[in-house]
Amino acid sequence: MSETRSLAVVTGASSGIGYELAKRCAEHGCDLVVAADTSLTEVGQVLRDLGADVVAVRADLSTTEGVDQLCAAVEQAGRPVDYLLANAGHGLGHAFLDQDWADARHVIDTNITGTVYLIHRLARRMRDREQGRILLTGSIAGLMPGSFQAVYNGTKAFIDSFAFALRNELKDSGVTVTCLMPGATDTEFFERAGMTDTKFGQDKKDDPADVAKTGFEAMLRGEGDVVHGLKNKMQAAAAAVTPQSVLAEQHRKMAEPGSGQGG
């Protein structure tokens, strides 16, 4: 890796928003360490074609061992991390009590535990250097109770809150923290979550490239949070003044299995 180029670490980089964020980093002149729990062979080639040196790490970031594996690859790169884009995460549909516990636990450990552990390990060095930018992929889902997505929305509520708190702790440190809060995005999320038959699953979604552009540019500006798209901004504003019980019922109508069928 070139010592004259910035180094970016991007998790969840195999597809969707994470893939597009990695491309943005490469186009910005960064070398990359990318991670995902699926193959990164094609992704790595795309990023190299954009001029980046790339280290690809296939690891389960819901586990301590997976995060340690990623951090070891960063250490081997021999360079400080300039940009940390913590995007890894996934969802899970259906009623909480009907979910397999191992699946629900994996959502929690990926979205929260692995993300927070990774930041704890890498952001300390950013603080020591008094330089760096962190982007966490939260969600407007974290602003509302997620009936039939209860665990996922709860994890995103944690990430949204954690990002704001960490940003405050790091003010005046030279390290910025930005929370990207997308709405429904055209990725593998709904298929992986078993939600293709829901209204959420069938409604029109945002382009992940546009979402990534919004988040990446906000990170470069050092902004605290950014919601992509006018519709999502309106939903976020409405969530701030709507009773939680009403939000939960509204979410139910969008996320309940079969809600996308039969008008």
Image (cartoon, helix red, strand yellow):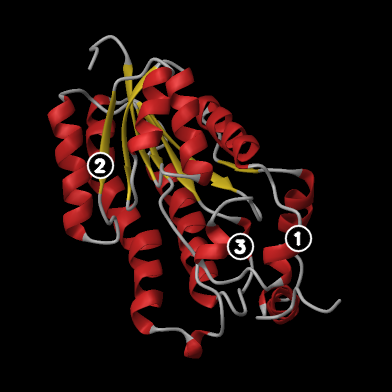
Q: Position of residue 142 (x, y in %)?
A: 57, 63
Q: Which residue is mark 3?
A: 141
Decide: marks 2, 3 in contact (CB < 8 A)? no
Viewport quadrant of the N terminus? top left
- Mark 2 and mark 3: span between their CA atoms? 28 Å
Dot 3 or dot 1: first in sequence order is 3
Q: Which residue is mark 2?
A: 57
The image shows residue 209, relative to residue 142, as above or below, that is above
The image shows residue 118, relative to residue 262, as above or below, that is above
Q: Which residue is mark 1?
A: 203
**Circle 3 residues within 10 Å: few <14, some 14–19, many ≥20:** many
Residue at 47% across / 18% down in the picture? 28
Residue at 35% across / 31% down in the picture? 44
- Mark 1 and mark 2: span between their CA atoms? 33 Å
**Marking on residue 30:** none
> Which kind of residue does numbered mark 1 sit on?
Asp
The quadrant where residue 42 appears: top left
**Circle 2 residues within 10 Å: few <14, some 14–19, many ≥20:** many
Q: Position of residue 63 (x, y in %)?
A: 23, 61
